Image: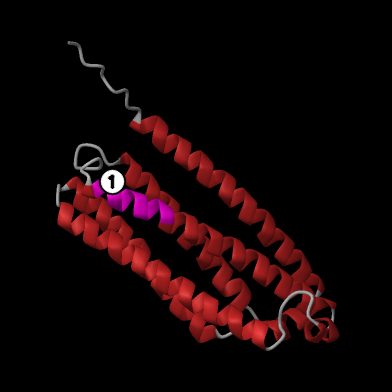
Amino acid sequence: MSTVAVHRDDVGSKIGMWLFIFTELLLFGGLFIVYAVYRYKNPVAFHLAGEELDVTVGTLNTVILLISSATVAMSISAVQYGNKRATLSYLLITILLALFFMINKYFEWSGKFGHGMYPGSEKLTELGQGEVLFFGLYFAMTGLHALHIIIGVTILLIMLVRIMNNKINKTYFVQLENSGLYWHLVDIIWIFLFPLFYLIS
């Protein structure tokens, strides 16, 4: 009875993930260019609209994602040392931090909708074209980022299950590494979104 060897290409897997990350950066890079052009054309309106955002919430979410980036990196280090318990713990902390981020974002968005500050609302239309563009970009770009958070959490949950079933271990952890790369991408995108919408005056 012969056994079939399972083909593994860890290098190819990593290259594939880096190519995917590159396409994602191109997507958000295009959106950043659109933002820069509209901000250049509507500096006062963008400044006034930016004051409607809560810097404290944005800062808190930035700290949350930075910590989550560290914990996902620690989970990869832990699995390399064969520490399954630590790997699961760090990964679970990462997922919980992501959920906290989404909860904060939900309340932030709810506040904006409650005050009529959303695309298509009468209040926003009355303020002018610049404010409409600002909040249109704000909801589009932070919404797209939130979608990436949801996808990232789903991937990390799958990794959690695979680690529990010993399908990811100290001898085979490229899937967890790739998941970590994706999560770092999510964090990097937010690091650009945060100053653009919350800090630049």
Quarter placement of the C terminus: bottom right
Which residues are drawn in magenta?
A: 154-163
Per the image, the residue denoted by label 1 is: 162
Left or right placement of residue 196 versus residue 105 in this view: right
**Residue 33 vs residue 186, the one in the foreground:** 186
Q: Which colour scheme is used?
A: secondary structure
Q: Is residue 182 magenta?
A: no
Q: In this view, does 3 lie to the left or right of 181?
A: left
Q: Is residue 191 above or below residue 21?
A: below
Q: Which residue corresponds to the image point at 49% horizontal and 86% vertical from the top-left?
A: 56
Assign a secondary structure to mark 1.
helix
Quadrant for the N terminus in the image: top left
Label 1 amino acid?
A: Arg
Q: Is residue 172 above or below residue 128?
A: above
Image spot of residue 97 (x, y percent): 37, 70
* Res 28 → quadrant: bottom right
Judge by depth and name the residue closer to the eye, 179 or 102: 102
Q: Number of labelled discs?
A: 1
Q: Where is residue 112 in the image (x, y as percent from the top left)?
A: 64, 83
x and y, in percent, of residue 149 in the image: 48, 61
Dot 1 alpha-carbon crowd within 10 angstroms: few under 14, some 14 to 19, many 20 or more? some
Give whichever of 105, 197 is nearer the camera.
105
